[in-house]
Amino acid sequence: MKHIKDFMQQFKNLREMMAVYSDEAKCREYMEQMRWGGNPTCPYCGMNKPYKLKDGKRYRCRDSQCKRNFTVTIGTVFEDSKVKLSVWMAALYLCTAHKKGVSSHQLARDLGITQKTAWFVLHRVRLLMGDPEPDVPLDNVVEVDETYVGGKWENMNRKRLKHHRETGKDNKTAVMGLLERDGKARLTVIGKNSFKDVVRANVAPSANVYTDAHLGYVGLAGEYQSHEAVNHNIKEFKRGQVYTNSIEGFFSVFKRTIFGTYHLVSPKHLHRYCAETSYRFNSRKMTDAERFKIALSNTEGRLTYNQLIDKK
Ligand SMILES: [Zn+2]
């Protein structure tokens, strides 16, 4: 982990980072250090100590059966792209540092790349902003609530609007928010699952679960340490420790992000924005450099939030 600590001490802002990592060779060196820790490994067969080719980028596997060429970006989200590593690094920094995210138009202007490239880069970067511990359930006190996103007439293109009128379908997508008090939060598209299925998939049975009075949650009491509901219909919002205000606050951040930064999010991509907003929330106490680092390490999944936090 030494190189991680060194890296964090290197820069405090984008300008400092760009001063060091505007050079392709430096970026490559850094990524190699990040991924292999000074011990390059063939991504195809796992053999160490490859030959370095003359171009300074590629390696050739020394295994006589394999003999394949590879670079440090093979098998990562940076694979197969003509985008420079320095652009990736700057984009990743901008996306992780900005509280409400960056639009592809903004990123294109900031980095002097086309909007099409920026769009591609953003979608790849978003993959890095997932939960590094998706299988660890929320526990202790967990607030759960649901919200509905999209469906605004003015946000629809003509084709969708026509389809909407013909089918008469409600265009909104249901999203569930789950938040462990003083811990992590998750947003997830409910889709065809039942409310209870989503809770079961994300919350440990030892938790105390607080929801609103929606019928979809009825029956959870038998499966959890406890389940209590506040009834918003009769203007009950708080009963001692039983409330869902934290998750409602998180929803408002989510909606500001979607409408403020991205303006329009199609249901097809909504789950990615859910992941991005959760990531921002869960890393809110980190410095920009730490957030950058966590996202970059997701290319290999080597570093978790807990490992980083324990380090301090
Ligand atoms: Zn190999």
Image (cartoon, grey):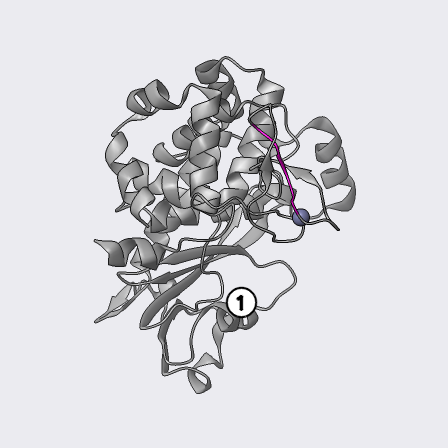
What is the quadrant of residue 124 in the picture?
top right
Would residue 263 be found to the left or right of residue 68 on screen? left
Q: Residue at x 54, y 43 (%)?
A: 127
Q: Residue at x 27, y 43 (%)?
A: 5
Would residue 128 be found to the left or right of residue 280 on screen? right
Q: Which element carries disc 1, helix, strand or loop?
A: helix
Residue 149 vertical position relative to residue 22 in the rendered view, above or below? below
What is the quadrant of residue 143 in the picture?
bottom left
In the image, 159 versus 274, the foreground residue is 274
The amino acid type of the residue labelled 1 equals: Val
Q: How many marks?
A: 1
In the image, 258 versus 25, the foreground residue is 25
Residue that badge 1 annotates: 198
Residue 37 vertical position relative to residue 104 in the rendered view, above or below? below
| x and y percentages locating residue 191 in the rendered image | 63, 58
Would residue 214 be found to the left or right of residue 269 on screen? left
Residue 299 vertical position relative to residue 189 in the rendered view, above or below? above
Q: Residue at x 72, y 27 (%)?
A: 158
| x and y percentages locating residue 58 in the rendered image | 61, 31
Question: What residue range appears in magenta?
Answer: 57-62
Task: Inspect this view and state whether residue 250 appears.
Answer: yes
